[in-house]
Amino acid sequence: MRGRIWVFGSHVDTDAIIPARHLHTSDPAELARHCMEGLDAGFADAVRPGDLIVGGENFGCGSSREHAPLAIRAAGVGCVVASSFARIFYRNAINIGLPIVICADAVATAADEQEWEVDVEGGVVRNLTLGTEATFEPFPPFMKKLLRAGGLVAHTRRRIASGELPRRRAES
């Protein structure tokens, strides 16, 4: 994926990503309208499909709400690159199909408005503005499947539809 980057600092918590006052809904479109509102009130209006978020250490810390990665994905962000992620945010992002990448070397040279390309399959972040690249450990095959499918629920639905997993019968 390729896009313009939005740089946020370290310890960006889930309340900054999607403030708690907006958690009355799980509607992705509504959450997208308030994405990153706690740090940049204009982000949701200015972000373009495929843009990338870059964070420092411990991106997504705070509560375990799945709303945070959902808001980011629904806003059109193609990927989040950070030096590190809070564990629960990392898992929630994969579960909802939001690609996230740990690549401190790329983060170190990040500045707003740069153009980046992230090869999630190959493990490379290219800073097209500076002409540099940094590598990261690619996802294992099972996580690549989840991301390609659009997340855990979509992956499971496909497995059920294909007959790979049995349909569960309703209990009487």
Image (spheres, helix red, strand yellow):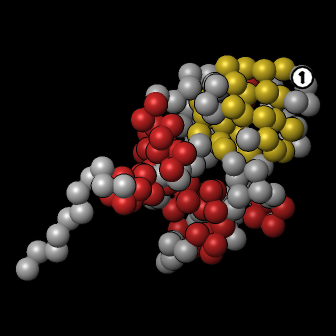
Q: Which picture quadrant has residue 100?
A: top right
Question: Which residue is at the far front?
Answer: 163
User: Outermost residue, left direction?
Assistant: 172
Q: Position of residue 34 (x, y in %)?
A: 67, 68
Does residue 118 sit above or below 105 in this rendering? Answer: below
Q: Is residue 167 visible?
A: yes
Q: From the image, which quarter does the N terminus lie in?
A: top right
Q: In the visual, does 5 lie left or right of 29?
A: right
Give the residue displayed 79% in from the left and 27% down from the top.
126
Residue 84 vertical position relative to residue 166 in the rendered view, above or below:
above
Name the residue rendered at 49%, 78% in the picture: 24
- Residue 101, image x, y percentages: 60, 34
Tell me the amino acid under the disc marked 1: Gly
- 4, above or below 82, in the image: below
Q: Which residue is mark 1?
A: 131
For the residue pair 130 and 55, the one nearer the viewer reads as 130
Q: Position of residue 111 (x, y in %)?
A: 84, 36
Q: What residue sits 86% from the left and 38% below the top?
A: 115
| Residue 147 placement (x, y as % from top left) | 52, 45
Viewer-side residue, 55 vs 131: 131
141 lies above or below 11: above
For residue 61, say whether it is visible.
no
Q: Nearer the viewer, residue 120 or 145?
A: 145
Q: Quadrant of residue 88?
A: top left
Where disc 1 sits, the SS reads loop
In the image, 156: left or right of 89? left
> Which corner quadrant holds the C terminus?
bottom left
**Image position of 111 (left or right of 102):** right
